[in-house]
Image: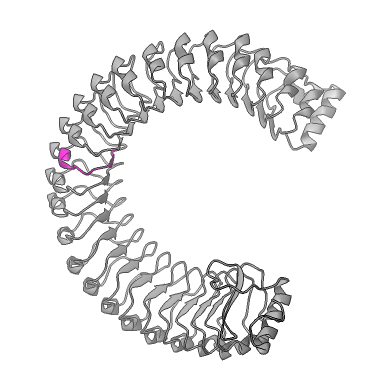
Amino acid sequence: MGENQPVDTEELIVLKEFEKIIGQSIPIANTIENKSVGVSIENRKIIALTIVGKDLVRLPDSIGNLTSLKELNLYRNKLNSLPSTIKNLNSLEMLNLNDNQINNIPQSLFKLTNLQSLSMWKNGIKTLPEEIGNLVNLSFLDLEVNKFESFPDSLGNLTNLKELWLQGNLLKNLPDSIGNLTVLEKLYLHVNRITSLPNSIGSLKNLKFFDLHGNKLENLPESFGKLENLIYLNLYHNKLQSLPESLKNLKMIQELVLDHNELFEIPPFLFKLKSLKDLSISSNNLKKLSSLIGNLTKLETFRIHNNGLTEIPKSIGNLKSLQLIQLQFNQIFSLPSSIGNLENLNEIDLLNNDLVNLPESIGELKSLEKIVLDQNKLENLPQSIGELTNLRELQLRNNKLKNLPKSLGSLKNLNILALTNNELKNLPSSIKNLKNLTYLNLAGNKFTYVPEIVCQIKSLQYLGLYDNQISKIPECFENLNALNNLDLSGNFLTHLPASIGNMQTLDTLHLNNNQFSDLPDYFKNMKSLEFLNLAWNQFTKIPDAILGLKNLNHLHINHNQLNELSAFISNLENLILLNLGHNNLSILPESILNLKNLSNLFLGGNPILESPNPNMKSLIEKLRSKNLI
């Protein structure tokens, strides 16, 4: 700041001291909210000062002369103390000391009785003195991610507090005086060591958001039910085995999180919370879901995964507002036909259950965009599956499907179809109608050939055919002009069709675990190829067709029978990773040192590493000096 700036001389001197400490000028700005360095001035007085992330290690004593200062932001510096003159900042309303190194809050700070907002998260504060209760005008206090174990009784003096952030400390309990904070609206106590709450917690009549996740609570006081304005309550990852019946009085609550506790049932009184929109009770010990679940007609999100449920009650169909339901990792063997009533359902996750079939009514879920059915026991799909015209993602991995219904071709908006590890041998011809399909995984099935109908799905970007029994690839693959990732590993392939050279968009190709001994010359036309896996085949040398692929950056040709490496390997100038492990290489060309981008070279399991040849010993040492092996 220059000498002609409109600020009192005495305050200008203070700014000059700050500028000297941080090694740069401090500009004037009308607003400094998003500035790392800045100052606001009003009537020749400094009213706001921001110095963020400048490794500031001290404040000048003269800061006490900024008596009109209302906002001071010193976030992310290296301060470990404050000058005693800080107490002179009588006008200060907002003080941000987040992410510094102030282990002890200085007494001078507690003289700032006009302070309305104090932020000191991530400082390493170990104790809070009683004097913190002097800051009676505070409406916002953030002391998260420090190291204190208790809060003094004087907390109860802060009767103007609306937000209190104490998460990420070592708190074991709270003082009874917390009940005095009757205007408090947000209380964040998560990730502490709290084992119990005082009864006075029920006096927080205006509390709307209460986060207690990641503590050691075994029960809640009956007074909890007096928090009648509570909208959000998070009790995730505690040790609760039961809940007080008084919770039925939380008539305003919209989101209740009870995941990772030790509950054996959802208490019946919880089904009286008619305002609930989001209920999470996953990873408990639930064996049954009460039919009373149908009373929560405003529910939009329901998470009850990782329990021991075997069935879902018919009343689930009453939840007409439901958009997401997560039922994965249970033991559900059937779904009620009423599931079709969930007209607003957008996503359902049934991963890892015991489903043998799906009800025909599944086709009535007209809003459904994603359904996860991996790891069940499905042997077939209902024809009605084709009525899910908004479906974008269908996951059916690890089932027992032997065929697919023709109606599958009606899923015009489908983007992802995952059919890995089933018992499929063919596909319905209607699959060609999936004009928006970008991902198709048919791996781990019983295909002995590639159905040519696949070549008509021109939108495909990923095609997985690995771990089948395929011995031949159709010429029509060249029609897949959007395909960029093709996985043919784990089959019985010995050669590729000439047309594969026309696949100009392909950048990733897996041919590992087949029976290739060479690649055809037309392979050199695959100019976009960046990743090529040829491991576990029968190559005795790197095919010449590969050596012109300038964009190749990953080449795996380990576990073959290579006994030589062409000097032209250096043509692959963009190569980052080259895996030559477990071959018969006893010699390498010097040109391998010309691969300037190479950062990973695998040679393990080759005789060259033990070669007595002095030239090879020297080459290996050079490669080691580059940290390549």
| Magenta segment boundaries in residue numbering | 339-350
Name the quarter where the C terminus is drawn: top right
Q: Residue at x 56, y 14 (%)?
A: 501
Q: Quadrant of residue 59?
A: bottom right
Nearer-the-camera pick, 529 or 355: 529
Q: Could you tell me residue 390's position as x and y percent?
A: 27, 35
Quarter of the view holding residue 265? bottom left
User: In the image, is residue 48 above or below residue 528?
Assistant: below
Q: Quadrant of residue 337?
A: top left
Left or right placement of residue 526 versus residue 242 in this view: right
Q: Is 65 within the magenta?
A: no
Q: Position of residue 245 (x, y in %)?
A: 18, 66
Residue at screen point 17% across, 31% down: 359
- Is residue 151 or residue 81 the one in the foreground? 81
Residue 567 picture location, percent across and down: 77, 18
- Specify whether residue 345 is in view: yes
Q: Quadrant of the N terminus?
A: bottom right
Q: x and y percent of residue 68 in the render?
A: 55, 87
**Residue 269 seen in the current view:** no
